[in-house]
Amino acid sequence: MSAAQESRVPQDGPGPSPAGAFLQVKDLRVHFPTDDGVVKSVDGLSFSVDRGRTLGIVGESGSGKSVTSLSIMGLHAQGTAEISGQVVLNGDNLVGASAEHIRKLRGKNMAMIFQDPLSAMHPYYTVGHQIVEAYRVHNKVSKQVARNHAITMLDRVGIPQAKSRIDDYPHQFSGGMRQRAMIAMALSCDPELLIADEPTTALDVTVQAQILDLIRDLQQEFNSAVIIITHDLGVVAELADDILVMYAGRSVEYASADEIFTAPRHPYTWGLLGSMPRLDRERTERLKPIQGAPPSLINVPNGCPFHPRCTYADLTAGASQTQLPELLEISPRHFLACHLSEQDRQRVWESEIKPSL
Amino acid sequence: MLTYIVRRLIGAVILLFVVSAVVFSIFFLVPRIGGATPDDLASRYVGKSAGAAQIHQTAVLLGFTDPIYVQYGRFAKGIVVGENYNYGPAVEHCPAPCLGYSYITQSPVLPDLLDRLPVTLSLAAGAAFLWLVGGVATGVISALRRGSFLDRSAMSVALAGVSLPIFFTGLLSLSIFSYGLGWTAPGGASPMDATSPLNWAYRMILPWITLAFLYAAAYARLTRAGMLETMNEDYIRTARAKGLRERDVVIKHGLRAALTPILTIFGLDLGLLLGGAILTETTFSLPGLGQYAVQAITNNDLPKVLGVTLLAAVFIIFANLVVDLLYAVVDPRVRTQ
């Protein structure tokens, strides 16, 4: 048992990022009490991100990705969510901190880019006004100085003629430009942590790559810690250093991006990889969807939450149906929550999954 | 933008003529269709003891014997260029815009209306200020404290406000605050008076509050619904993510968006009210346009009815136009189209 204890995600975790990382999330639980029962959106999640690094959080809709990011930002409405665990930003635990304290960190130390830039920007204010507002909350400068800063930011994110476009309204921008403006707004106070929640989902495919490139460039320039939340492994393949695969509010696999793509071990990760279109391989007949639907977060299945959809659940002699798998370090910096034996995992991956991708 | 305004103004003029024609037909054409002779109509405007000859003379004098289109033409001409009327010993010229003469008092209608307008104006302006501020503030607080005791009591009061008629709340407040406690004037108005605003407020405060209560209730519910909707929008989350103070999030981002539909309703309500707040003016004996309209209808004084209806129509149409133009100011998405 001692070996297992050692290899559990330790509280000060050498997760895929080294200890003392800029952002450390430890055993985060976000529960929403409702009339139908408690929705366990996030249930014991741990990860860490350092400055200059990018973490990709991947999972289906309803796996708790966005809830995680909103809890880090302290954006859940007061009284609706029960949050426990730790969110340590630069040594400062945000869970249980005063709302005013977190408000002062928001925008300045941690910023967020949202999914749909059209609905995420106020339709009645100019793009410039909204960036200036973001800058002046945390910087006591004149409107003129803030405006010049906003023009610089718009220019930096690649908006042509930023000087005149700054007075446009969001609806006068194209989708890609709006997302660039959102990024400019998020980065206006030079935050150390940037959370991008499905930053490319609402965008044209041709624009998606540009936005991802932009995020990567800016990260290098600003040396920020970045969390990219997405359901699309293709997005994180481009950007992420580490990948956390979430299912039903838990982490099922957590490893470096290389590991996830070359030696994935969780059947759910296999499913995600199988449902990802690839242009660099010969085309197989069809994409393979993961059978079934994500579970209700009120009645999470007993045992491994993924077992009703898992093709290999029968190989575990009933453990999948009864026992919740722990997240264990199966090889250095590769964490996995699965009951399959290492031999089975290797065999299935090598013989069935890998050839079909 | 300018062509749009001009187009709307032309449309407004046409609409006014349609309104005047409809109102005119209701009072002059419908009785004819119903079988009334010009003498029947004229019999209302002579003494009880008048003989048939005298009645007929009055009918000729008031123009009832002319074909209906001639009568309307005379009315319309009066509005556009002015018209000569001969109701008594001499011909009188009524300059444009002429709304005709009262059948009863033989006095011109327009100066009467203009005399009464300040009373209605001061009633509407004061009440509008109160209900807009009170209703919107209540709605915002209710929305932010949704489901709380405060929210539920405010919404219950609002429901009462919408349901209780003015002649009930008005009389009740009169009996308590005016006759009982003696805090306010028991009725009668003074129009806006720069020299003694206190006296103005003393006379008008009760009508203001009574009228505002009715509207504030509706505005509170409207604002609450709007705020509940906008506070769930993504851009509110963005505003919070920027680190804005909650007060700025609510007012600059939430309320700003929720106010747009309220502005529309406010313009229309105000326009409607300027045409005469009939119940309030009657309850508090305010000599405004509403009371004037009631008296005109009671006396069958058709030119007065026609005049006050047209004036009300002008206010409503104008308010509509202002609201539409304001929309472009408030919502930039409308502007570019």
Image: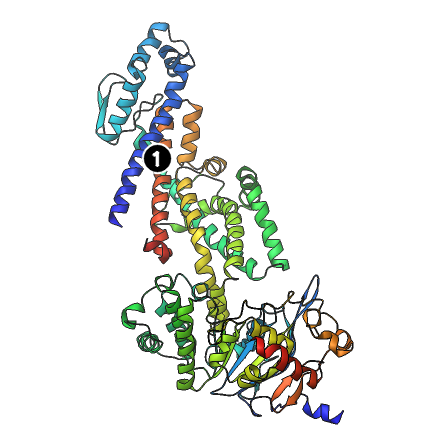
- Callout 1, which amino acid? Leu
Say above or below: B46 vs A62.
above
Say above or below: B65 vs A226.
above
Q: Is residue B99 left or right of residue A248?
A: left
In percent of width and height, residue B158 lies at 57, 49
Q: Chain of mark 1?
A: B
In percent of width and height, residue B126 lies at 42, 48
Element on which disc 1 rests: helix
* Closer-to-camera residue (B69/A356): A356
Q: Is residue A262 left or right of residue B299?
A: right
Q: Is residue B154 left or right of residue B312?
A: right
Q: Residue B64 appears in which quarter of the rendering?
A: top left
* Closer-to-camera residue (A216/A314): A314
Local packing at callout 1 (Cα closer than 10 Å; few below 14, some 14-19, many 20+) is many
* Closer-to-camera residue (B201/B316): B316
* Closer-to-camera residue (B224/A152): A152
In percent of width and height, residue B190 lies at 39, 42
Residue drawn at 35 percent across, 12 percent down: B38
Q: How many marks on residues? A: 1
Q: Residue A272 appears in which quarter of the rendering?
A: bottom right
**Which residue is labeled 1 in the image?**
B311
Specify whether residue B112 is in view: yes
Say above or below: A242 vs A40.
below
Specify whether residue A188 is in view: no
Say above or below: A292 vs A237.
above
